Image (cartoon, helix red, strand yellow):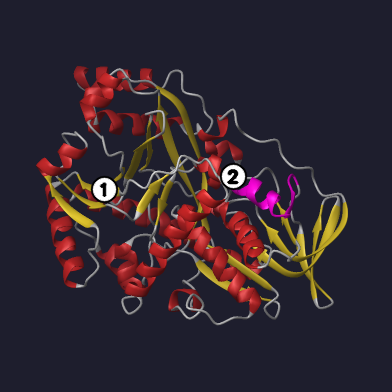
């Protein structure tokens, strides 16, 4: 390694020397105390399993639909402690993990999906206001940036295609000068600015605020209460917990990456570890050096991509790139901390923003999210319609889980709605194969994606075969 490169690497390492290996969001002093665990037996009309966004929105929307409905929510640890409390805080209107994925998979439904997504984000914003949830909601939009010349041409062509298909509302193409006028990085060569389709928020405050809203409407929330099994019980269902049980007429499962109580659903998702850094608050001078006056969320266009944004106190969250799948789909706390990824991310950060040399990172963290082979959520029902589930959000569930909650409630009600008529809702993705095939296929896909990024975006035979089969693995 050349001396200058060694010096830069030492600077990146130094920037991490005081970083705490915990999610920045979860250290907020406003974190609420957990609700007591369930002891004994309880009964309800609707039991919601999971205290992340999926479960919280389901419980809240159920009470708003029918205030008289008796709702119980079980959380195995604490509300918002996992993916819902440590994500990047990008709240997207897209229900399909982005417009390209949606257009490729559901071209006949894409206009309806886009409209439903816009309505869902509007409803999300209205619910935050209605329940007084102080989650630092900012509807700033998002810029997808090109950092290579071929990516700039692809973004331009993509924008033209969207215009031809009538899908370019509020989406603006930015050339190099225009995108750098928004955010000053020497690596940016073009961008697509979705002005209204994405909001920024504080993810943990959203989860805590949803919990409080549920409690205020009469939902009984039990924390530190894992659901151990699910069985039919008369005309309803029964769930056993360590110190008690719940009998319910209907059950909604929102456990996502954690093992689904319906074993047949487990093959459709695999756990992927994602990592992020958070800087110290930028000074006025540092913020001026990079612009970013409109505070958009940002993501680059590579297969192995980064996502980055400003917090309310002008820290920069910088995450993504590495997506780590462990053999056998293991989910362990020790995987949450990965110094080699933090060092890699720090180097990428200072390449993007060399004018921020000397900035320190205060927090570095990671954790598991669920992904499925089509990258976006899938849905279903079981036990003669008494149980519904949603999973597979693949990192873009901050907004889409609210839509998924409504899908589960529709399914449990046995109603045919504009949501349940969607092909996206009616059909499932292909399941992942058993080990060692899953791990081998994911490893080969990751290698191929990195190779494509290094060779002008050219996809090899493996990726082209995966494209034809509608399969993939996203960073």
Does the segment drawn in magenta span residue 218?
yes
State the residue in front, 346 or 418: 418
State the residue in front, 157 or 28: 28
Q: Nearer the viewer, mark 1 or mark 2?
A: 2
433 over 235 or under it: above or below: above
Left or right side of 164 for 279: right
Asked whether the viewer can see residue 246, the reply is yes
* Magenta segment boundaries in residue numbering: 207-224
369 over 120 or under it: above or below: above
Name the residue carrying label 1: 143
Q: Secondary structure at mark 2?
A: helix
Q: Earlier in the sequence, mark 1 or mark 2?
A: 1
Q: Residue at x 23, y 57 (%)?
A: 171
Name the residue carrying label 2: 209
Q: Position of residue 197 (x, y in %)?
A: 34, 56
Residue 95 lies in what quarter of the image?
bottom left
Asked whether the viewer can see residue 255, the reply is no
Q: Secondary structure at mark 1?
A: strand
Whole-angstrom CA distance, mark 1 to mark 2, is: 28 Å
- Category of crowding for the residue at label 2, using alpha-carbon neighbours closer than 10 angstroms: few (below 14), some (14–19), many (at least 20): many
Q: Position of residue 211 (x, y in %)?
A: 64, 47
- Category of crowding for the residue at label 1, using alpha-carbon neighbours closer than 10 angstroms: few (below 14), some (14–19), many (at least 20): many
Q: Residue at x 63, y 67 (%)?
A: 65
């Amino acid at each position: 390694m050349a001396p200058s490169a060694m010096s830069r690497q030492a600077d990146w390492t130094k920037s991490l020397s005081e970083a705490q290996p915990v999610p920045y969001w979860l250290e907020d002093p406003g974190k609420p105390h957990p609700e007591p665990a369930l002891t004994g037996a309880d009964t309800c009309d609707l039991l919601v399993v999971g205290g992340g966004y999926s479960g919280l929105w389901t419980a809240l929307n159920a009470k708003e639909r029918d205030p008289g409905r008796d709702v119980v929510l079980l959380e195995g640890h604490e509300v918002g402690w996992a993916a819902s409390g440590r994500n990047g805080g990008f709240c997207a209107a897209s229900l399909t993990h982005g417009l390209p994925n949606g257009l490729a998979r559901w071209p006949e439904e894409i206009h309806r999906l886009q409209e439903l997504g816009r309505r869902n984000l509007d409803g999300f914003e209205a619910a935050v206001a209605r329940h007084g949830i102080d989650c630092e909601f900012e509807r700033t939009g998002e810029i997808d940036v090109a950092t290579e010349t071929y990516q700039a041409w692809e973004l331009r062509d993509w924008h033209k295609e969207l215009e031809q298909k009538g899908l370019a509302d509020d989406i603006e193409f930015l050339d190099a000068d225009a995108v750098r006028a928004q955010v000053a990085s020497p690596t940016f060569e073009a961008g697509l600015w979705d002005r209204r389709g994405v909001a920024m928020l504080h993810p943990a405050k959203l989860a805590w605020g949803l919990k409080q809203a549920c409690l205020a409407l009469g939902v009984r929330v039990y924390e530190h209460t894992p659901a151990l099994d699910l069985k039919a019980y008369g005309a309803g269902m029964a769930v056993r917990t360590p110190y008690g049980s719940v009998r319910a007429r209907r059950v909604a499962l929102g456990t996502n990456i954690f093992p689904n109580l319906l074993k047949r659903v487990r093959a459709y998702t695999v756990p992927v570890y994602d990592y992020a850094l958070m800087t110290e608050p930028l000074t006025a001078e540092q913020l001026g050096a990079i612009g970013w006056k409109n505070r958009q969320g940002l993501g680059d266009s590579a297969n192995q991509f980064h996502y980055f944004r400003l917090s309310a106190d002008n820290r920069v969250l910088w995450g993504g790139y590495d997506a780590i799948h462990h053999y056998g789909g293991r989910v362990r706390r020790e995987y949450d901390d990965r110094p080699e990824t933090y060092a890699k991310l720090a180097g990428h950060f200072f390449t993007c923003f060399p004018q921020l040399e000397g900035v320190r990172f205060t927090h570095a963290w990671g954790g598991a999210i669920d992904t499925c082979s089509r990258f976006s959520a899938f849905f279903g029902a079981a036990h003669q319609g008494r149980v519904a589930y949603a999973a597979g959000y693949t990192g873009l569930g901050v907004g889409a889980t609210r839509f998924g909650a409504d899908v589960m409630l529709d399914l449990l009600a046995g109603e045919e709605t504009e949501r349940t008529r969607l092909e996206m809702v009616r059909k499932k993705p292909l399941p992942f194969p058993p080990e060692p095939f899953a791990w081998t296929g994911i490893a080969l896909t990751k290698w191929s994606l990195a190779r494509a990024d290094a060779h002008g975006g050219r996809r090899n035979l493996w990726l082209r075969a995966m494209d034809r089969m509608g399969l993939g693995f996203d960073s």
